[in-house]
Amino acid sequence: MKWKLIYPRWRKLDRQTPFHLPPHGPVVFAAAVPAGVEISFVDANVDVLVLDDEPDLVCLSIMLTAQLPHALEIAAAYRLRGIRVLAGGIAVMLHHEELRTFFDGVFLGEAEGRMEEVVRDVENGTLKPVYDYMNRYPDIALVGTARREILNRKAYVYRNIRMADLVHASRGCRFNCFPCCTGYLGGRMFRPRPLDKVVEEIASIENDRLFLVDNSLAQDSRWEEDLFRAMIPLGKKWVSHPIEEDDRILDLAFQAGCWYVYQAVFDTSETIRRRIKRYHDHGIGVEATVILGTDDHDVDAIKRLVDFLLEVELDLAEFTIMTPFARSPIRAKLASEGRILSDRYEDYTCDRVVYQPRRITPENLRKMYDYAWDTFYSGESQELKMGRLYLSVLRRERTLPGRRKDG
């Protein structure tokens, strides 16, 4: 049986760096598919996508809301020729009610231990319109090593530098941050993978540079310590979302190869200032992920925020406009207040204003988005700052015997 797995195209965030990271969802999904199924993979962002072939099933792995327009085009092209299409991924879970008629089936939830049922249905010609496993989480031990061999490796190189491979050590998140859909998608319970399986997967990845895509590593202090101690002998260099603000844990993270972290910044508080300094004191870089347009933001507040970011000497910053994604707490709030301005999937790229801000006009918020990028990178371009951060990891790699000395 032949399945074609497609990661649809999407318009990148305006001002975002031009490189592409290898997608994580498709390779994790592929690991859950039984061995008897032959999988071909196309990342439509970097690979040539042809639509005149005849696989037994087309599987669309759709992470972003902004990928949905292209996903619908792909599905329509195949279904017109009688080829069945199954769609899954984050965006499908967020919008499944309105999407069901566009696909032959939608898969909701996590795939491990569930694909055998889909295989049988495809073989019997009885593909179900909905496979609903939402809030029915499989045994986390079933999560296997992602099938990265299906990727076109040459597509994920930028200026002769190989992009980091993505890996996850846990699912779920005990936090419920206002712009985030994780509570709906993966539950509020922290679910760590067995440590030996995480170590086995990381050790199997030929790339020395990784992105730990867990929602947050700051979930359980003992687990963080155990994870970092286990990673030290692997000699990898990695980036992640926040780590617990604890000197012992941060020191272990550095020893384990932490290169830099993504730190959400919403305000100019001393808490944020202290956290950034603490990372730096432990040799860990910081890229701020900055959301513009919260209810306390006006033009002056955003200018003060940008000044603050320059003052605390961040390594990098990525600015986005607050975006009320489906199923997030902020979506529920803004919808109840009648402040949603657009439901067009293609507008949900975090660089367009799709809601009515409270203290600034949509037009001025979009102008302040450009102001933030231009001002933060006025002294040194984004690529130069990224290069500086990259050189730091090269210096660390050269201290490890047997590691590659090139990009």
Image (cartoon, helix red, strand yellow):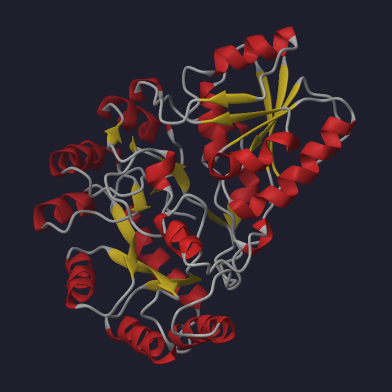
Q: Quadrant of the N terminus?
A: top right
Q: Residue furthest bottom?
A: 300
* Left or right for 349, reference 389: right
**Which residue appears at 47% of the width and 67% of the height?**
337
Q: Position of residue 154 (x, y in %)?
A: 64, 46
Q: Is residue 186 left or right of residue 121?
A: left
Q: Residue at x 42, y 42 (%)?
A: 184
Above or below for 172 versus 290:
above
**Residue 246 position in % (x across, y down):** 12, 56
Q: Up-down: is 21 above or below 363?
A: above
**Camera-side residue: 251 or 112?**
112
Pick whichever, 206 or 288, lies toward us. Answer: 288
Residue depicted at x 53% and y 42% = 90
Whether residue 286 is visible: yes
Q: Is residue 152 visible?
A: no
Q: Quadrant of residue 37?
A: top right
- Spot the residue most to the left: 248
Looking at the picture, tell me which residue is in the foreground, 83 or 281.
Answer: 83
- Residue 278, how many percent across, how many down? 17, 67
Side of 261 where 277 appears, left or right: left
